[in-house]
Image (tube, rainbow, N blue to C red):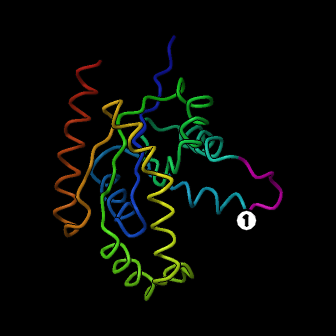
Amino acid sequence: MTTKKPNVIFVIGAPGAGKGTQCERICKDYTYVHLSVGDLLREEVNNSHSDLEIACRLIENAIKKSGKENYLIDGFPRDMENITEWQKTMNEKVVLQCVLDFDCDEKTSIDRCMERGRNSERADDNEETLKKRIATFKKLTEPAIEYYEKKNLIKHVDATKDVEQVYHDVQNVMKTILESTDSNL
C-alpha cells in the first residue's frame, strides 16, 4: 500500500508582499494548510526543552503532525542553502507543486510593513530595518527564484496590486495547479 505524498507550494516574497494574507485566503478556498517557517522557527526558539532544529525538520514535523494533504510553506526557501537541505531531507517525501513568488517593489513593501507596524508589536517594522530586510531578501532569494524558474516551477504574482486583484491572480495559479494535479492522477 502506497501512502500519497503531501503536496507543497512554497510561498516567497519580500516583507509586506502579502504572503500571509494570500495564504490565509488560499486556505479558506482550497484544502491547504498554511505553515509559516518564521512562526515555526520562533515557536522552536521559545520551546526551551527542545534542541533548535533546522527549518526542513520543523516543516516535516508540522506536516506529520497535521496529517493533511496540501501545504503552503510561507517564507521558504530563503536561499540556495535551504534548497540544498530540502533536496536532501524532503524532496522524496513531498510533491512540490510550484513556488508562488509574490513580486513587490521596495516602496510598496515598506509602505505595507509600516502600516502593519502601526497595528502590530513587530519591532522590525521600521523603515531602516525594512530596507535591510528587503535587500537581504533580494540578495539571498534571487538565486533560489532563478533555480526554480529553470525547473518551470515559479509562478510570479504581481503583489503591488490591491488584495482582491492579487487574489484573483492567485486563484488563476491555483486553478492551473489543481488541473495539473488532477491530470496526473
Dot 1 crowding, Cα within 10 Å, few <14, some 14–19, many 20+:
few
Q: Which residues are magenta?
A: 46-53
Q: Is residue 48 magenta?
A: yes
Residue in front for this viewpoint, 33 or 180: 180
Measured from the top left, where is residue 68 in percent x and y? 47, 38
Measured from the top left, where is residue 57 in percent x and y? 65, 41
Residue in front for this viewpoint, 160 or 37: 160
Residue shown at 64%/63% (left/top)?
A: 42
Residue shown at 61%/36% (left/top)?
A: 85
Q: Is residue 141 magenta?
A: no
What residue occupies the far right of the structure in this picture? Answer: 49
Residue shown at 66%/61% (left/top)?
A: 43
Q: How many marks?
A: 1
- In the displayed structure, does residue 169 sit left or right of residue 78? left
Measured from the top left, where is residue 33 in percent x and y? 43, 48
What residue occupies the far top of the structure in this picture? Answer: 1
Task: Return the residue at label 1.
Answer: 46
- In the displayed structure, does residue 101 sit left or right of residue 49? left
